[in-house]
Image: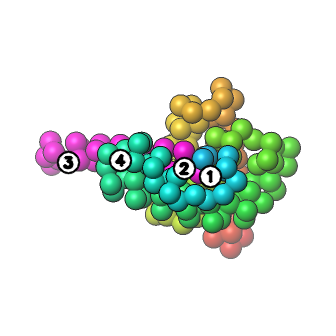
């Protein structure tokens, strides 16, 4: 039986924490832009600088936030079809932006879907309402089923 060197789990853990911090910052930047009604890169850079000492995390977070912001209308339409009783405009702002970020990641990144959902649920637990984790999970699960149906050709 082979054993991983001790440094490998630590490296893996460090990368996971970096990715979580990136998502957290990206969600916060999206929230900021959503609240202000516009993408303000200067404000986002300042916010990111306060949020992380790691230049790589800041750059990745701003890139994720920008990409999700660019796709927000299409994502919101998709979410409104899935949860017509809770259209994005009626969702708590944190949930709305967490969902935007996660849907963007599900459709544009190589991250395993389970990781995207788990991370979004964890961020909802940390930053939103008591009902948010279940709501975010339900919406993202439905989005994921829709994506799988489209990609499998059924």
SS under mark 4: helix
Mark 3, residue position: 8
Q: Which is more toward the observer, 144 or 85?
A: 85
Closer to the camera: disc 1 or disc 4?
Answer: 1
Whole-angstrom CA distance, mark 4 to mark 3, is 15 Å
In the rendered structure, find residue 33 and report the number of the disc placed on it. Answer: 1
- Residue 107 can be seen in this image: yes
Mark 2, residue position: 29
The x and y percentages for residue 100 are 64, 54
Q: What crowding class fits label 3: few (fewer than 14 Cα within 10 Å), some (14-19), or many (20 or more)?
A: few
Q: Is residue 106 left or right of residue 80?
A: left
The residue that appears at 53% across and 31% down in the rendered structure is 126
Ranked by sequence position, the earlier of labels 1 and 4 is 4
Q: Are marks 4 and 2 in contact (CB under 8 Å)?
A: no
The x and y percentages for residue 99 are 64, 49
Closer to the camera: disc 3 or disc 1?
Answer: 1
Q: Are marks 1 and 2 in contact (CB under 8 Å)?
A: yes
Mark 4, residue position: 18
Image-quadrant location for residue 52: top left
The x and y percentages for residue 131 are 69, 29
Q: Which is more toward the observer, 86 or 65?
A: 65
* Magenta span of residues: 1-30
The residue that appears at 55% across and 62% down in the rendered structure is 66
Vertical relation: 48 (above or below) 67: above
Vertical relation: 73 (above or below) 130: below
């Amino acid at each position: 039986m082979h054993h991983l060197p001790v440094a490998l789990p630590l490296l893996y853990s460090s990368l996971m924490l970096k990715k979580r911090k990136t998502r957290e910052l990206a969600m916060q930047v999206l929230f900021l832009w959503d609240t202000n009604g516009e993408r303000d890169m200067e404000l986002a850079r300042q916010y990111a600088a306060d949020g992380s000492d790691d230049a790589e995390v800041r750059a990745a977070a701003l890139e994720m936030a920008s990409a999700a912001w660019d796709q927000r209308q299409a994502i919101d339409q998709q979410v409104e079809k899935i949860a017509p009783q809770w259209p994005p405009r009626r969702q708590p702002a944190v949930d709305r932006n967490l969902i935007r970020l996660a849907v963007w990641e599900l459709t544009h990144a190589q991250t395993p879907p389970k990781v995207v959902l788990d991370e979004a649920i964890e961020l909802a637990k940390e930053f939103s309402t008591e009902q948010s984790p279940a709501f975010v999970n339900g919406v993202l699960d439905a989005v994921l089923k829709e994506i799988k149906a489209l990609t499998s050709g059924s």
